[in-house]
Amino acid sequence: MFEFLKKIIKKDSPEKKPVAKKEIAKKAQKKPPLAPKQKGTKAPKILDKKKIAAPAKPVIIPSKDAEKKPVTSSKKEAVPKEEVAPKEEKKSGFFGFADKIKKGLTKTREKLTSELTSLFTGKKIDEALFEELETILLTSDVGISATTYLLDSIRASVKKNSIENADEIKGLLKEKLTELLSPIESPLLIKEAKPYVIMVVGVNGAGKTTTIGKLTKIFLDENKSVLIAAGDTFRAAATEQLQVWGERNNVHVVSQASGDPSAVIFDAINSAKAKNIDIVIADTAGRLPTQKHLIDEISKVKRVINKCHEEAPHEILLVLDANTGQNAISQLKIFNEALGITGLALTKLDGTAKGGVIAAIAKEQPTPLRYIGVGESIDDLKVFNAQEYVDALF
Ligand SMILES: Nc1nc2c(ncn2[C@@H]2O[C@H](COP(=O)(O)OP(=O)(O)O)[C@@H](O)[C@H]2O)c(=O)[nH]1
Ligand SMILES: [Mg+2]
């Protein structure tokens, strides 16, 4: 794609007319698909819900019972390949925390590094250079307003400090980007709520269930007890997928063979109360933010949670797939309007060169970015740190 944009830039070289900002922006924005393409995940079908006729009695499934496959399912959910989590755990011991993030962000870094290196090497600072930088940022999904903000700040610094060497712009870019991202660095702090309820929402395939599995591991490592509520009742396979994660982490998954997500979550919270469990993580069915009735339904889930604990849900975590690029912002806006999103998890940063979307979020819809997903394994969810992230990018 960049080759294509390079051609455009060459064609509209500075002697001619500067490339119209809006035009570039349009091109950069055309790319992101509306919803992530996921192998093995399908849009939730309301039909599925009807098909599963079963008693509405909730059951607590201990992890060892998961093998019994109590819920009927025609399709296998995409369960990450590595069933054997311990192996992965051992392996990750060799990597430092920052190394793992660096590894995960390889694609975005490679794109940025190669483009920025060719941009800055031996060039003088002029309008053409800023325009090329603008294109690089837009095609990394930094978004129009964050790109404009970064360029304006860099321009101001260049002027103020009479910088002449183009090589110095990279350092400035890192500095300004860190400044932009710092406000959304806001790790999740679990209050003594007993149980602390985390409601996980997002479009289908964003990585909700996987994130819940990884998140459970993080909390267990902090010596907290966890109960998972299988609130995605649209697909039986979704419950199975969650049970596999429950089994891996050795935690209980509260599920119900059919019916109402609110009922399952309500039940899980009451069960956690009775057992003095610290945290309840509730999965929900994926939905497109454009489907108003589904958004209304999830608002109902929130209200029901609130009935069993006046402060709950304590965290409404929106899971966003980094591959969706700028579309992530519109998802965030719609979910936020309906539910009041308190935190974000940005997944699949390992599979995309669109890691710049974090800057767009920070500028357009600043929301605490709790976690970033940099792989499919149980240890691939990391607490977001702005400096670490920027260091991994360049
Ligand atoms: N590479 C990569 N894949 C991920 C990540 N998070 C989730 N996935 C994959 O994305 C797919 C959909 O995830 P899932 O949790 O089922 O999404 P859900 O529909 O929102 O619950 C699965 O194949 C996951 O393994 C991530 O951080 N990196
Ligand atoms: Mg799911």
Image: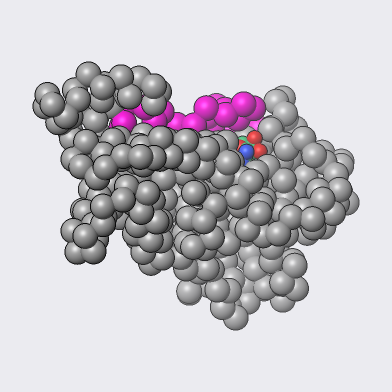
In this view of the protein, can residue 261 be seen by the observer? no
Which residue is painted at 82% across and 41% down in the image?
83
Front residue of 115 and 338: 115
Front residue of 54 and 276: 276
In percent of width and height, residue 320 lies at: 48, 45
Front residue of 53 and 324: 324
Residue 160, quarter of picture: bottom left
In reply to whether residue 42 is colored magenta, the answer given is yes
Quadrant (top left/top right/bottom left/bottom right) for the N terminus: top left
Which residue is painted at 35% across and 40% down in the image?
122
In reply to whether residue 54 is colored magenta, the answer given is no
In percent of width and height, residue 55 lies at: 70, 43
Q: Is residue 115 above or below residue 159?
A: above
Q: Is residue 163 above or below residue 115?
A: below
Q: Residue furthest bottom?
A: 192
In percent of width and height, residue 35 lies at: 45, 31
Q: Is residue 3 above or below residue 99?
A: above
Which residue is painted at 62% across and 72% down in the image?
195
Segment colored magenta: 28-52
Front residue of 177 and 228: 177
Answer left or right for 151 relative to 84: left
In this view of the protein, can residue 122 be seen by the observer? yes
In percent of width and height, residue 30 lies at: 31, 27
